[in-house]
Amino acid sequence: MLQIKNLNKHYGKKQALFDFEMTFKNGVYGLLGPNGAGKSTLMNIISDNLAPDLGSQLCWNGTDITKLGSKFRRKVGYMPQQQALYDNFTARRFMMYISALKGISTAVAREQTEYLLSEVELHDVMDKAIGGFSGGMKQRVLVAQSLLGSPELVLLDEPTAGLDPKQRVIIRDMIHKTAKDKIVLVSTHIVSDVETIADEIIIMKQGRIAANGTVEQLVSVLPHERRTLENAYMLHFPEKNTAGGAIDENSSV
């Protein structure tokens, strides 16, 4: 269980997160919001890649993650928003490299590499250089590497960016299957990415939680004929129009 209390984050004079509080248990959490809502900042803090402001509390099963250190980081699988891949590596070599960084034994790494690349339908090209992959294929490699080592907490930042509809379904199905015994937090600005798989939705706006709950709870305030997650989402962004739930394209934090 991941418990977050009084989470704040400043970048100089700009505040990116305001008193974020949430308790996460096993399941899929959809973190929705436009670019600039604070989603990536939250993911970076949870993954221990970014320090929060003093006074913020993040606890894993009751223990502060700063006290757990590397023990906590080994429980985390993280897919960053930016594609950080080695173009001269094959997909297999990249997965084995990440496995080594995570301290996974060679035998287990080989088995998991084969399985995970098959799950994202890259098994046939896993011995080809990543530099020749499309953006969507690179995204799928990043999703696969986040699951190496059977992490208990999986953080996926915009996992379907650049994917075609078929690839989106592949990733959604994989997330749904993965979350049976894990906490999976999926950050996205596309409502359809999480509408059918998330156990809980968290809508963020300007660094704050604007609303949270199950899809059924969020849509219950709408007339029956308008009960979709996108319409519930847009209640919090009346000044914007959307296409598939995308709000705006300001620089993200």
Image: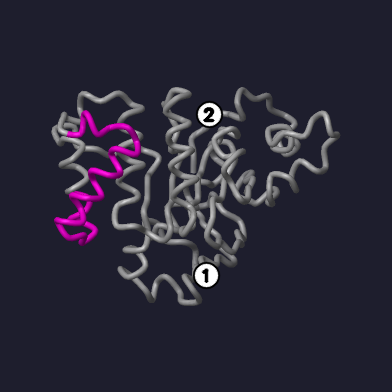
Q: Which residues are magenta?
A: 97-126
Q: Which residue appears at 16% of the width and 35% of the height?
A: 90
Q: Which residue appears at 58% of the width and 67% of the height?
A: 5
Label 2 sits on a secondary structure element that is loop
**Quarter of the view holding residue 135:** top left
Q: Is residue 109 magenta?
A: yes
Residue 29 image offset from top left, x and y in percent:
56, 50
What's the distance in space between the residues labelled 1 and 2, CA to CA? 30 Å
Mark 2, Cα crowd under 10 Å, few <14 / some 14-19 / many 20+, is few
Mark 1, Cα crowd under 10 Å, few <14 / some 14-19 / many 20+, is some
Residue type, mark 1 in image: Gln
Q: Main secondary structure of the magenta part?
A: helix
Residue type, mark 2 in image: Glu
Is 42 located above or below residue 172 in the figure? below
User: Looking at the image, is mark 1 or mark 2 earlier in the sequence?
Assistant: 1
Which of the numbered marks, if any, corresponds to residue 57? 1
Horizontal side of 36 relative to 225 (left or right) equals left
Is 224 located above or below residue 97 in the figure? above
Q: Which residue appears at 20% of the width and 53% of the height?
A: 109
Q: Residue furthest right?
A: 223
> Do the numbered discs 1 and 2 sit on residues whose CB atoms are within 8 Å?
no
Which of the numbered marks, if any, corresponds to residue 249? 2
Residue 53 image offset from top left, x and y in percent:
49, 63
Residue 21 image offset from top left, x and y in percent:
61, 62
Horizontal side of 228 relative to 53 (left or right) equals right
Residue 47 image offset from top left, x and y in percent:
40, 57
Q: Which residue appears at 36% of the width and 54% of the height?
A: 77
- The colour scheme is one colour
Seen from the viewer's position, the closer of residues 45 and 196 is 196
Q: Is residue 201 magenta?
A: no
Seen from the viewer's position, the closer of residues 140 and 234 is 140
